[in-house]
Image (cartoon, helix red, strand yellow):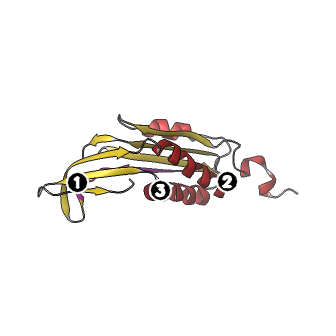
Amino acid sequence: MATTNDHPGEQAAQDPIRLIGIRDSALSLDEVFRAVGDDAAGGTALFVGTVRNHDGGADVEELGYSCHPSAEAEMRRIAEKVAAEFPVRALAAVHRVGDLRVGDLAVVVAVSCPHRGEAFEACRKLIDDLKHEAPIWKHQKFSDGTEEWVGAC
């Protein structure tokens, strides 16, 4: 009798990276979710990062994201690293740049794996690594007139 890992669906897909992008327009949950559809995936985890109305105890008035020209390539590198560490069937990540308002989607990532636990872990690794490693910066302006730049996501 074969073990579950002997089935091709239990393994990572040959090219699991289905969508990587930096966008200057509104992000679509449907686009990202559709990108990670895979018949061999039993679990899909989706993370949505939104602009909130506060940070560090201060009210956020305006927010903008900018990125280095290498940001999309760095996102792909990070995605490849996650796909190598987990049995990823499909992976997608898009990040917004430009001026955003409270409630706007800033980043959407999704990962499909054979099982839910793997999908959750891979999705968390993907967003955490994007936040720490991708050259994307957030510029916040607060209601008290102060402002700050926040490195990566």
**Reading the chain from its start, which is encountered first: label 1 or label 2?**
1
Labelled pair 1, 2 in contact (Cβ < 8 Å): no
Q: Number of callouts in the render?
A: 3
User: What is the three-letter code of the residue carrying label 1?
Assistant: Asn
Provide the residue span drawn in magenta.
44-54
Gap in angstroms between the C-alphas marked 1 and 2: 36 Å
Q: Residues within 10 Å of mark 1 (few under 14, many from 20)?
A: some
Q: Position of residue 135 (x, y in %)?
A: 42, 50
Q: Position of residue 18 (x, y in %)?
A: 58, 39
**Reading the chain from its start, which is encountered first: label 3 or label 1?**
1
User: Eyeballing the image, is 51 above or below 54?
Assistant: above
> Is 23 situated left or right of 5 in this image?
left
Which residue is outermost to the front? 69
Picture quadrant of residue 151: bottom left
Look at 44% across and 46% down and name the residue there. Answer: 108
Residue that carries the numbered disc 3 in the rendered image: 133
> Is 8 situated left or right of 97 in this image?
right
Q: Can the viewer see residue 86?
A: no
Gap in angstroms between the C-alphas marked 3 and 1: 25 Å
Q: Residues within 10 Å of mark 2 (few under 14, many from 20)?
A: many
Predominant secondary structure, magenta span: strand
User: What is the three-letter code of the residue carrying label 3?
Assistant: Glu
Residue that carries the numbered disc 2 in the rendered image: 87
User: Eyeballing the image, is 98 above or below 10?
Assistant: above
Q: Residues within 10 Å of mark 3 (few under 14, many from 20)?
A: some
Residue 64, magenta (yes or no): no
Residue that carries the numbered disc 1 in the rendered image: 53
Q: Position of residue 41 (x, y in %)?
A: 64, 47
